[in-house]
Image (cartoon, helix red, strand yellow):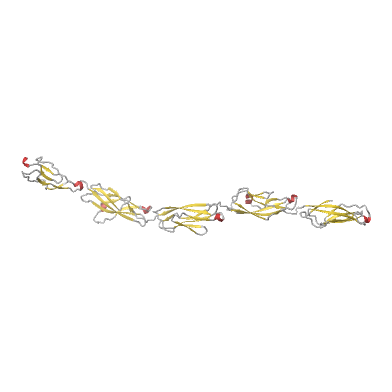
Amino acid sequence: MQLKVLENSPPGTVISLGNAVDLDVGRNGLQNYTIAPKSPFHVHTRRRRDGRKYPELVLDGALDREEQPELSLTLTALDGGSPPRSGTTQVHILVLDINDNAPEFTQSLYEVQILEKSPVGSLITTVSASDLDTGNFGAVSYVFFHASEEILETFQLNASTGKIQLLKGLDYETINTYEVDIEAKDGGGLSGKSTVIVQVLDVNDNPPELILSSVNSLIPENSAETVVAVFSVSDLDSGDNGRVTCSIQNDLPFILKPSVENFYTIVSEVALDRENRAEYNITVTVSDMGTPRLTTQHTITVQVSDINDNAPAFTQTSYTLFIRENNSPALHIGTISATDSDSGSNAHITYSLLPPQDPQMALDSLISINADNGQVFVLRALDYEALQAFEFHVGATDKGSPALSSQALVHVVVLDDNDNEPFVLYPLQNASAPYTELLPRAAEPGYLITKVVAVDRDSGQNAWLSFQLLKATEPGLFSVWAHNGEVRTARLAERA
């Protein structure tokens, strides 16, 4: 006999069995039934109204198809004769499955790691659940349980295989851990749950960041330990990928000082000199400790502002200017020049005449200077015979605060012009009568009659004199020596 019994049949369930036939009657006829071996069933012998006896199989305890999906029993029919006789038959019982087992995951918690920037389609992990039931009741499918929009956009779950794959790129700095709940359902509506913790591993994909809090791009010269900039550094990566080092160039007069919480200050180390260098470019280099190392650079331009620490400097300590006498008034005779290493108003120079050392000298009526460009002018005509040279001081003053100044000596040399006629000192000239000298008749040629003495108020070649005979009543009798003015006879006078 083959029987089918649901595994959830309650104890006391009665299953009818086929009966045996015994041709004997009375005591020698069929008396009862037994079943073996021991099982969750027993057999009960019942009597019909016509006296025939038939067996019923009675369930004593609960069945569990997952523990014992089928039973093989031997049903024995016994008579009461002597010796007793029996007949047997095999009873094969199939325990029919019901959906009494929910799917169970092999792990209640899956913990996996994956590198950020892993390509789309990468396998995260595979979840697995089993169901002890059979058929549709044991067929398991996988779905996300109460998944957020972010999880649905990031991961793909294969309903049949339990494979979880990447749908889009991961970013450790945005989300570094995902908690994904997975539900396994069977065909009968039962389900089991498991959690997958996806830990995103950082890769060094973020360069360090530098954020300036304050910048003092204009600092005064001659001041030390001036704060140039305050900034912070950070790196979105983690571990060594997020640890940073910071540096600036070594050949600059600035030092980098670490502060608190990844803050740094740049401070001038020594007093700066604008005249030596007016601008600095400080390059801040921030590198992380990852592999490969990522670096960020930021350049801070610092201008050195001027203070009035340089006096004007003349191009020469003294100047010599030349002017020819009888000049026209307001004549430009030269330029006095000074420079100032400072800038702006600190370098704006004005020129002036300084009071003369000789108080008797009316310098203002003689000389003027252009305050803006240092051009020197002679205000009136000069006479070499009255004034051959003079000197004065020029001051150069900047417009700083306080103002700085310097001075230079200017020599003016008056050049002679041939503006004076020679003047005869001897013999004295008389407008009414000429000068008379006696000549002996016996005078030999070369006899010195007289010497004409003359002077010239001019100088140099303008004062060099030469003498010549202009007119004589006796031509050829007299001669004048050109260089000394001596008048001598050229021949014997008696020949005249």
Seen from the viewer's position, the closer of residues 69 and 309 is 69
Q: How many marks?
A: 0
Measured as percent of width and height from the top left, residue 350 is found at 33, 52
| Residue 203 x %, y % | 57, 52
- Most extreme residue toward the bottom is 260
Q: Residue at x 51, y 52 (%)?
A: 296
Residue 419 visible, this angle: no
Answer left or right for 353 relative to 77: left
For this rendering, which residue is in front, 69 or 157? Answer: 69
Quarter location, residue 439 = top left
- Is residue 136 visible to us here? yes
| 439 lies left or right of 297 | left
Left or right, residue 135 beside residue 165: right
Q: Residue furthest front?
A: 83
The image quadrant of residue 359 is bottom left
* Quadrant location, the C terminus: top left
- Residue 157 coordinates in the image, percent (x, y): 66, 49
